[in-house]
Amino acid sequence: MRVAMIGTGYVGLVSGACFADFGHDVTCVDKDPSKIERLERGEIPIFEPGLDDLVATNVRDGRLSFALDGAEAIRTADAVFIAVGTPSRRGDGHADLSYVHAAAEEIAGLIEGFTVIVTKSTVPVGTGDEIEAIIRARRPDADFAVVSNPEFLREGAAIEDFKRPDRIVVGAEDPRSQAVMRELYRPLNLNETPILFTGRRTSELIKYAANAFLAMKITFINEMADLCEKVGADVQQVARGIGLDNRIGSKFLHAGPGYGGSCFPKDTLALVRTAVDAGSPVRLIETTVEVNDARKKAMAGKVAAALDGDLAGKTVALLGLTFKPNTDDMRDAPSLDVAPALMAMGATVQAFDPEGMGEAAHLLPGVVFKDGPYDAVAGADVVVIMTEWDQFRALDLNRVKLLLRHPVMVDLRNVYRPDDMRARGFRYASIGRV
């Protein structure tokens, strides 16, 4: 099938490359000339394990191409995917749909023959109706159907998630569009991947509900971690004890400094705004947003407590800056709250991240960026593990101890064992363990 993918961000590029790998003819379209030029040179603008090889293979085999002008790709497409950004709108937290609407306007003037327009971007309930109205107003004669097909990709594991998903959700009102979507995803029949067909508005809400539930699960275990510290329990054992219950499950029960990234913060906020506007507030999600925001801000206090509450004139080494490992994504990362708070307390912050320092340099003025984990640790009064990159899981702790001014570690990802760290002579603090 012929596919046009509007947007070459995280979702658009991964989805486009994977559809091409399924055997479809895919053109990824973007308005940013520099991004298209980089992609045509074989440079991948985001870090995602395996994506560079996947893109290169499908470009070489002629199934994947890139274009600044999407007119030809849209005219000949069986399906046009909208995969543009929907950031939180300043001031009210609603999803900003300006890029989605602009894409719909462009598509309206170009489609020929029956075309399925697929919303891959995360959008509020009713956006599919708006896209349909925009296209219908401009092209009353057009033969098309608008479909919702939300993505459920984890950064760092996106290719695996696309090719071996738990489920595919499709919100489609037109039987012809269902047939097109089945054909697009037909290669997944080998894995017997369930395809859930729903109404369009239901599909749009499923995406928000899924992300909100996972964000709530993270926030729940973080609050349990605080309670564990007060009563002398171990949050990792609590998480295992409840996660073995099949009704709960073990995923997303890892205590830490709070969730971040491109999805959970903006999607929980957008769901709250949608629910309030609909007159049906989602109190649990409202509280989840508030608790998570407060948690990220509180982590600097945890670091200060490890140095008896005084950070004036001290140096803090931050290992990891991205919101999770195996990505260069800095969006809403806890480090964006922690580092400025540490500096406001009088600390010098020196940091290292394997992939995120290029973006972090624009977001964290005043932070001293280092070439490696041991460079960051050298001369610091305390080392803080912010992101659980693999290379931070097996540090030479004897070397770390020698490089630090004081053997103090604050482990915000529970990478190390408290008893072992104390036996090595560290003053050690973690999340939800004593």
Image: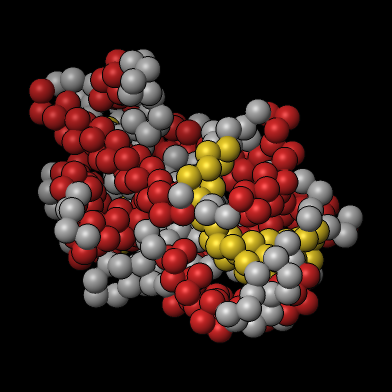
At a point 58% along the width and 38% down the height, the residue shown is 195
Q: How is the image coloured?
A: secondary structure
Image quadrant occupied by the N terminus: bottom right
Residue 272 found in image quarter:
bottom left
Q: Position of residue 410 (x, y in %)?
A: 29, 40
Whether 108 is drawn above or below 81: the answer is: below
User: Is residue 35 in view from this perspective?
Assistant: no
User: Is residue 146 in view from this perspective?
Assistant: yes
At a point 46% along the width and 49% down the height, the residue shown is 199
| 19 left or right of 318 in image | right
Q: Position of residue 205 (x, y in %)?
A: 38, 51
Q: Position of residue 14 (x, y in %)?
A: 64, 54
At a point 63% along the width and 54% down the height, the residue shown is 177
Residue 348 found in image quarter:
bottom left
At a point 77% along the width and 60% down the height, the residue shown is 2
Residue found at the far front of this picture:
141
Residue found at the far right of this picture:
61
| 22 left or right of 377 in image | right
Q: Nearer the viewer, residue 306 or 188?
A: 188
Image quadrant occupied by the C terminus: top left
Whether 323 is drawn above or below 227: the answer is: below
